[in-house]
């Protein structure tokens, strides 16, 4: 009977030792005394609510345009020589008879002055003829152009003048002249249909074909 108790006690002690050994082989306690949860898989992590994902604009959303620059209006400055042609309405005319004469001809200057408030240009030949009065029709042939003087553009500021040379041939030099009295010259500025009048009595030939006058191109004074 004593031997049986010893065997039973050994069996019990051996069983208890086995249970302790199994317990020791289990999960090791964490330093804090609680079991550590197995690490989560990286793929199973849930993004934090505080991290916002950048929004992607739809492809058909127009991009914001930069504000356009408003152009400042700059007054246009006329280029040199870009002024309008001088017209009779803004000109005055006179003659200077001190040019002399020869062989029955008289040379004098035809002077035109800009009486307007803006600059203008004069270029080429005036139309010149003798006339009975300021409002009368031309008498005889108009002046022939004398082309030995080159044509230039003359810029006339307000108050400035240009001149051309008139040659008048005495009507008495022509035996077939039907002579009449003229009160002066009718002057048509280049590129104008309006005229000026310069009072200066001369004999004129009323019949066609007799040319008493020649005129040069305008030049700067």
Image: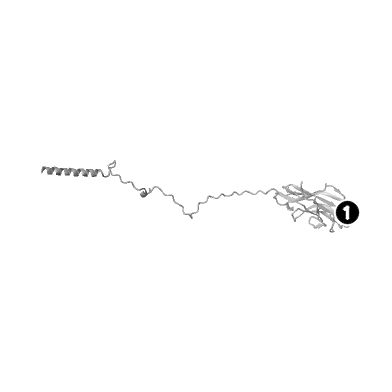
Q: Which residue is mark 1?
A: 173
The answer to which quarter of the image holds residue 20 is top left
The residue closer to the viewer here, 133 or 192, is 192
Q: Residue furthest top?
A: 31
Expressed as whole percent of the image width and height from the top left, the position of residue 69 reads 56, 49
**Quadrant of the image containing the N terminus:** top left
Q: Residue furthest front?
A: 3
**In the drawing, does residue 41 fall left or right of residue 58?**
left
The colour mode here is one colour
Question: Judging from the image, what secondary structure is the residue with disc 1 in?
Answer: helix
Q: Residue furthest left?
A: 1
Expressed as whole percent of the image width and height from the top left, the position of residue 134 reads 79, 55
Q: Residue at x 14, y 43 (%)?
A: 7
**In the drawing, does residue 41 fall left or right of residue 148?**
left
The residue closer to the viewer here, 24 or 121, is 24
Q: For the image shown, how many numbered marks are present on the structure? A: 1
**In the drawing, does residue 21 fall left or right of residue 1?**
right
Q: Residue at x 85, y 50 (%)?
A: 105
The residue closer to the viewer here, 50 or 197, is 50
Q: Residue furthest right?
A: 175
Q: Residues within 10 Å of mark 1 (few under 14, many from 20)?
A: few
Q: Residue at x 85, y 48 (%)?
A: 101
Expressed as whole percent of the image width and height from the top left, the position of residue 68 reads 55, 50
């Amino acid at each position: 009977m004593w031997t049986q108790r010893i065997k039973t006690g050994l069996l019990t002690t051996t069983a208890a030792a086995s249970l302790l050994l199994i317990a020791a082989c289990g999960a090791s306690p964490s330093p804090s005394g609680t079991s550590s949860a197995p690490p989560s898989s990286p793929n199973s992590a849930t993004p934090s609510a505080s991290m916002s994902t950048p929004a992607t604009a739809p492809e058909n959303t127009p991009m914001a345009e930069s504000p356009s620059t408003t152009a400042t209006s700059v007054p246009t400055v006329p280029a040199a020589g870009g002024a309008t042609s001088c017209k009779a309405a803004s000109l005055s005319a006179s003659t200077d008879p001190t040019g002399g004469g020869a062989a029955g001809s008289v040379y004098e200057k035809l002077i035109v002055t800009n009486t307007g408030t803006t600059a203008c240009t004069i270029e080429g030949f005036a139309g010149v003829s003798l006339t009975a009065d300021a409002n009368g029709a031309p008498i005889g042939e108009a002046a022939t152009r004398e082309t030995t003087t080159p044509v230039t553009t003359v810029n006339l500021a307000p108050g400035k003048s240009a001149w051309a040379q008139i040659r008048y041939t005495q009507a008495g030099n022509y035996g077939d002249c039907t002579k009449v009295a003229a009160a002066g010259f009718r002057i048509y500025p280049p590129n104008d249909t309006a005229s000026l009048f310069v009072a200066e009595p001369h004999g004129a030939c009323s019949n066609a074909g007799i040319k008493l006058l020649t005129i040069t191109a305008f030049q700067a004074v």
